[in-house]
Image (cartoon, grey):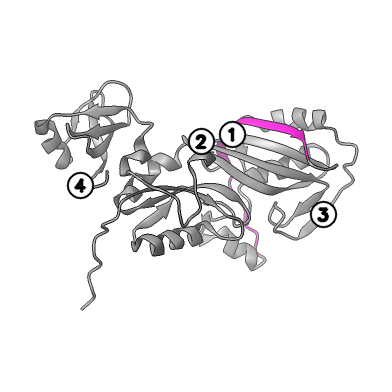
């Protein structure tokens, strides 16, 4: 008879400053061991060489990760002009070189404008996106390259400045979830008449969570569960409505467009509701109340 897994007893959100040289999954494993919980997830993969904000959810907070994942991301990094790589970053092998010694910062800024706003972006082969049930990075390791459909993303800001040495540009990017900064760097190189790759990528913010909130994996503070939805409109309901919420009932729509974080009178997060039909709201997630929320 299979042993039944115990329900999680630790719940919350940790904002981790991911170090270089480990995967996002490695960080999840670190926090599993630290808190003694299996139910742990993260808000969006960072490449192994990248550093910065990785939001980790523990216990019931994993059910709220979608509201963190959908938020905008902010990055800094460096674009190395004149060399394309197999991974679009410094971890890959150089596949082509170009003389781009005459490229100016002003020219790069003009090119970056073409990569700003709503754009269609082709994901890199070395990524976690699955094709035919297999991650692209697995296929890439086998030397297989497949057609990737362009995906809509929005780059809210693409700031380019002089880098720490000739032939290197410093960049800051604010973009929607699912945007590959490696691809932006490679596309920038092509627009400038050659090629380029990314190095020193650092994610400085995920939505409202910034580097200032983050700590190392072994000491990052475990924040209350409802930190995951702190940017959503807050609705407080009475005991009668709270009973309906606990049963996942459809309710009359709250003010605004949603989604809404629904609390009881004791400030326990009960659920997240979203718009439904014309004048109603339905639950996206219903949570049991738990100590530490």
If you read the primary sequence from the N terminus, does the residue marked by circle 4 or circle 1 appear first?
Answer: 1
Q: Secondary structure at mark 1?
A: strand
Contact? badges 1 and 2 (CB < 8 Å): yes
Q: Earlier in the sequence, mark 1 or mark 3?
A: 3
Q: CA distance from mark 3 to mark 4?
A: 55 Å
- Chain part drawn in magenta: 144-163
Q: Specify the quadrant that holds the N terminus.
A: bottom left
Comes first in the chain, label 1 or label 2? 2
Element class at badge 3: strand
Mark 3 or mark 4: name the one nearer the start of the chain.
3
Which of pointers 1 and 3 indicates the residue nearer the eye?
1
Residue drawn where x is 82% and y is 54% of the image: 96
Task: Residue under label 3, please give it.
Answer: 96
Residue annotated with mark 1: 174
User: In this rendering, is residue 140 above or below 246?
Assistant: below
Gap in angstroms between the C-alphas marked 3 and 2: 32 Å
Please state the horizontal and vertical placement of residue 121, each as a whole percent of the image.
Answer: 62, 41
Q: Magenta: predominant secondary structure element?
A: strand
Q: Nearer the viewer, mark 3 or mark 4?
A: 4
Q: Residue at x 70, y 37 (%)?
A: 171
Q: Quick check: 119 left or right of 238?
A: right
Residue 243, x across and y down, in percent:
11, 37
């Amino acid at each position: 008879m299979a042993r039944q897994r115990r329900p999680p007893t630790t719940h919350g959100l940790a904002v981790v400053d991911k170090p270089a040289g480990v995967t996002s999954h490695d960080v999840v494993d670190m926090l599993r061991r630290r808190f003694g919980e299996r139910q742990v997830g993260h808000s969006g993969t960072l490449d192994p060489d990248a550093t910065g904000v990785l939001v980790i959810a523990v216990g019931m907070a994993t059910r709220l990760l979608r509201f963190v994942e959908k938020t905008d991301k902010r990055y800094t990094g460096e674009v190395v002009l004149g060399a394309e790589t197999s991974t679009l970053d410094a971890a890959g092998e150089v596949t082509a070189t170009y003389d781009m010694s005459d490229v100016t910062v002003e020219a790069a800024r003009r090119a970056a404008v073409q990569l700003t706003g709503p754009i269609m972006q082709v994901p890199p082969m070395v990524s976690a996106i699955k094709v035919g049930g297999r991650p692209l990075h697995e296929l890439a390791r086998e030397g297989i390259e497949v057609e990737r459909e362009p995906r809509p993303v929005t780059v809210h800001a693409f700031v380019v400045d002089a880098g720490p040495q000739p032939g290197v540009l410093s960049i800051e990017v604010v973009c929607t979830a699912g945007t590959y900064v490696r691809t932006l760097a490679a596309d920038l190189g092509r627009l400038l008449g050659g090629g380029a790759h990314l190095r020193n990528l650092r994610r400085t913010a995920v939505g409202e969570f910034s580097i200032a909130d983050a700590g190392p994996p072994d000491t990052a503070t475990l924040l209350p569960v409802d930190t995951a939805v702190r940017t959503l409109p807050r609705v407080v309901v009475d005991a009668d409505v709270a009973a309906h919420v606990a049963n996942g009932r459809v309710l009359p729509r709250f003010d605004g467009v949603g989604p809404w974080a629904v609390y009881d009178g004791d400030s326990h997060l009960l659920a997240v509701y979203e718009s439904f039909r014309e004048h109603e709201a339905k639950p996206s997630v219903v949570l049991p109340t738990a100590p530490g929320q």
